[in-house]
Image: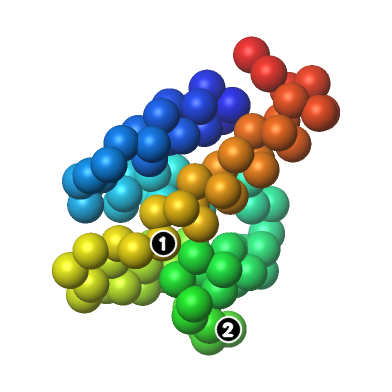
Amino acid sequence: MYTNLVIFRNELKNRNVSRYKLIGIITELIMSKEIFEKNKDVSAFMQDIFGVTIKDCILKSRSQIMAYTYRIILSHEDFENKDKLLKFINLKIDEFQAKGKVR
């Protein structure tokens, strides 16, 4: 996962990031058990990045979380929170390095 995070960071550093790349990056993050061990952990991520609160019924399934996230991304013309997502990824990269999980 560390390698993927580095790739995601490099993609997000570009000025214009395609919507399909954002969806792919966010999908990889949310579906990863290394990043979010429990579905409840995804809720804080969604609050920080998108400013939305996820209902408990949606939190029961990561597939439902992703469907909800897709709707949010597709409903906006531009993704303004790219910097917040980049900051989150940098934080996770630092955590992996601190734990020695770098491969």
Q: Is residue 93 above or below residue 31?
A: above
- The residue to which callout 1 is attached is 81
The answer to which of 33 and 44 lies nearer the viewer is: 44
- Residue 4 locus on image (x, y percent): 48, 28
Name which quarter of the figure residue 76 lies in.
Answer: bottom left
Secondary structure beneath dot 2 equals helix
Question: Is residue 23 rendered to the left or right of residue 89?
Answer: left
Residue that lies at the very extreme toward the top in this rendered image: 103
Q: Residue at x 31, y 36 (%)?
A: 14
- Residue 98 locus on image (x, y percent): 81, 28
- How crowded pointer 1 is (Cα within 10 Å; few <14, some 14-19, many 20+) is rated as few
The reply to whether residue 33 is visible in this rendering is no
Q: Quadrant of the C terminus?
A: top right
- Residue 77 locus on image (x, y percent): 17, 69
The answer to which of 56 and 10 lies nearer the viewer is: 10
Mark 1 vs 2, N-terminal side:
2
Cα separation, mark 1 vs mark 2, equals 24 Å
Name which quarter of the figure residue 90 lies in.
Answer: top right
Q: Residue at x 58, y 83 (%)?
A: 56
- How crowded pointer 2 is (Cα within 10 Å; few <14, some 14-19, many 20+) is rated as few
Secondary structure beneath dot 1 equals loop
Q: Residue at x 66, y 43 (%)?
A: 91
Label 2 is placed on what type of residue? Asp
